[in-house]
Structures are given as C-alpha cells and as structure tokens.
Amino acid sequence: EAWGLSSALFPRGRGSVPPFLAAQADAVISPSESHRIFWHTVATPHQVNKPHTGEVSDLNQQVWVLQGQTIVTVPRSNNVTPVTVTVVPCKYPELLGQGRGVPIYLGIENPEMCLSCEDIEGQPTLQLKEEEILDLYNEVEPVEPFLFYHSKNGSTSTFESVAFPGWFVAASDRGHPIFLTSHLGGTYNVNFILNINA
C-alpha cells in the first residue's frame, strides 16, 4: 500500500496534548492494519528493533534504484528492481522543530546505508553514507544530518532535511541522482510515494 504521512501525525490545535499522543489516538482509525502499526511506531516513543522497509516512487511511475553508491530515479518496469528503503522514526522528536512533519531516518538495504545531508562548499548536498539506521536511532540525541521531516502533500510525501530546513529531497530527469533543492514548484519533483511493506 502506498503510504503518505497522515495529517493525523501533526498537532492541530490540541492544546497541551503531546503530538505523539494525539497521533496515536488518530492512528487507530487508519484504513489498514499495516498502516496503523506503522503510524503507531513512527508516532510513539517506544523502542524500535528493526526498520520498516518499502520502496519509493512518484506519480510519474519512476522508482528509486541504486546505481553504484547513488540513488537514481528510473521508470518502473519488469526489468527494474527498486532499492529497498528503510525507515525508522527519531527517538527524540521533541528536541526538533515542531509542525514540519515527523522526523525519520531514511536509508536503504543491501548495502546498508543511510541518506545524509552535508554542507559541501556551502551547498546542502544529499549523500549516501555507510551507517546502520538502528545505530542512528539509538544515539543519545537526534543525528540531524541523517534526519528528514516527513510530511504529506495530497497522496504523496515530502522529505525535508532537518539539518537544512527548507531543503527537500528531489528528483529531476530519469537516470539522474536524487538531490536536495530549496526550489519548490518548479521543474524538480519533491513529491514521492512511500510504499511500506506490511
């Protein structure tokens, strides 16, 4: 099932109710059991023992694939194997900005690597680094370069860098690597569909 981050995961004028409790209350009315379990895991601060897995695509039927050490987008076909993405929530969302989305770590399987946002010559740059996603999750504080605010926009989701607010994971032409952009509404696509395995 395609999973875009539910608006149930955001505080919406609930007074002093903590966002994760409000989200937990809403999550029980999600349309499927697998979605409910995933929302519960992301929205509540309990121990995570393994990441959720799935794949990423977009409305143009392009999927993320791994080429060397780079994630690129290519048209979906029977000859294409999308890279398996891994998703784990931040253990300490209260230490980060509120109202931008739910902070998550985002990585891939085989090889195990994680997406990271680094400042390279003054430019926020998206990289794949050899990090185990559960090691990041178990750090004593949020590891901001590896975190993304995950929010829903219609049927799709966006991934905004925590380390560089206003910069989003984006794709351009087929066969090109995904990257970070601060230019929304232009030729770059920042809206993706995250399909989480049940």
Image (cartoon, rainbow, N blue to C red):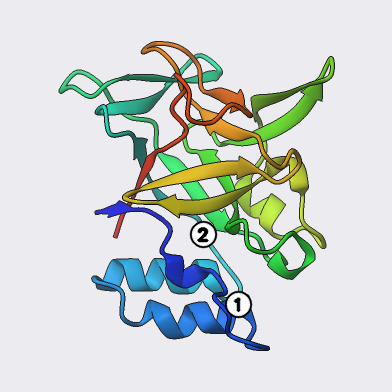
Q: Is residue 102 above or below residue 9?
A: above
| Left/right of residue 55 with respect to residue 46 in the rendered view | left
Q: Position of residue 107 (x, y in %)?
A: 55, 40
The answer to which of 190 and 66 lies nearer the viewer is 190
> For the residues marked 1 and 2, what is the alpha-carbon distance in whole angstroms?
23 Å
Q: Residue at x 25, y 21 (%)?
A: 80
| Left/right of residue 150 with respect to residue 162 in the rendered view | left
- Could you say which quadrant of the image residue 66 lies in? top left
On the image, numbered disc 1 is attached to which residue?
Answer: 19
Q: Position of residue 97 (x, y in %)?
A: 73, 59
Q: Residue at x 32, y 33 (%)?
A: 58
- First reached walking from the N terminus: tag 1 or tag 2: 1
Q: Quadrant of the N terminus?
A: bottom left
Which numbered disc covers residue 1?
Answer: none
| Left/right of residue 190 with respect to residue 167 in the rendered view | left
Q: Secondary structure at mark 2?
A: loop
- Residue type indicated by callout 2: Lys
On the image, numbered disc 2 is attached to which residue?
Answer: 50
Q: Residue at x 56, y 84 (%)?
A: 21
The answer to which of 198 and 94 lies nearer the viewer is 94
Q: Are the residues at dot 1 and dot 2 in contact (C-beta closer than 8 Å)?
A: no
Q: Nearer the viewer, mark 1 or mark 2?
A: 1
Q: Position of residue 166 (x, y in %)?
A: 67, 39
